Amino acid sequence: MSPIAPDAVLASLHHLLVFSLVAVLFAELALASAAPDAGRLRQLGALDGAYGMLSMAVVAAGFTRAVYGAKGWVYYAHNEVFWAKIGVFVVIGLLSAVPTVRLIRWRKRGVVPEVAAMRALRRWMLAEAVLIALIPVLAALMARGIGY
């Protein structure tokens, strides 16, 4: 088997996970844009759980690719754009903690939040969406050797 085949599998897995993560984020945004009710909060909680799991899978697949992929860890470890991409992902993760904690609190208390509280929650998700748009830009730069 060619050394390109494992790299292609790892790249494909990483990309599919990232696209899935973005899809879940936008599904959360869509749900959070309507008037809150108990059913919507359950759905948001389920999506938020999927978002967290996908985030961990993205990191695992990405670092597996960085270590075992065609370019190898040395390329990524010394690439400033790679670390900027990781930094953006960490900031997105920190931003996502706010909606996660709020959703958990609301569900535990059996509270349906006011429309204003849901709008505030959605703003945190929008910030995540804005930042997540930087990831493919940084990935494209990195793939072209910029930052190494």
Image (cartoon, helix red, strand yellow):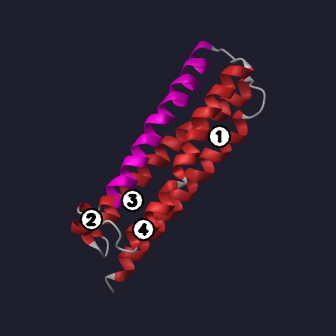
Residue closer to the observer: 12 or 78: 78
Residue at image position (74%, 35%) is 33
Q: Is residue 32 left or right of residue 82?
A: right
Q: CA distance from mark 1 to mark 2?
A: 32 Å
Query: Considering only vertical position in the picture, is 18 above or below 50?
Result: below
Residue 40: x percent and y percent? 72, 30
Q: Earlier in the sequence, mark 3 or mark 1?
A: 1
Element type where label 4 sits in the image: helix
Q: Is residue 87 left or right of residue 25?
A: left
Q: CA distance from mark 3 to mark 1?
A: 23 Å
Q: Earlier in the sequence, mark 4 or mark 1?
A: 1
Residue at image position (58%, 25%) is 103
Element type where label 3 sits in the image: helix
**Location of mark 2 (residue):** 67
**Label 1 environment density (alpha carbons within 10 Å; few <14, some 14–19, many ≥20):** many
| Farthest-out residue, right | 35
**Location of mark 1 (residue):** 28
Q: Badges 3 and 2: C-beta atoms under 8 Å apart?
A: no
**Location of mark 3 (residue):** 61
**Location of mark 4 (residue):** 141
Q: Earlier in the sequence, mark 3 or mark 4?
A: 3
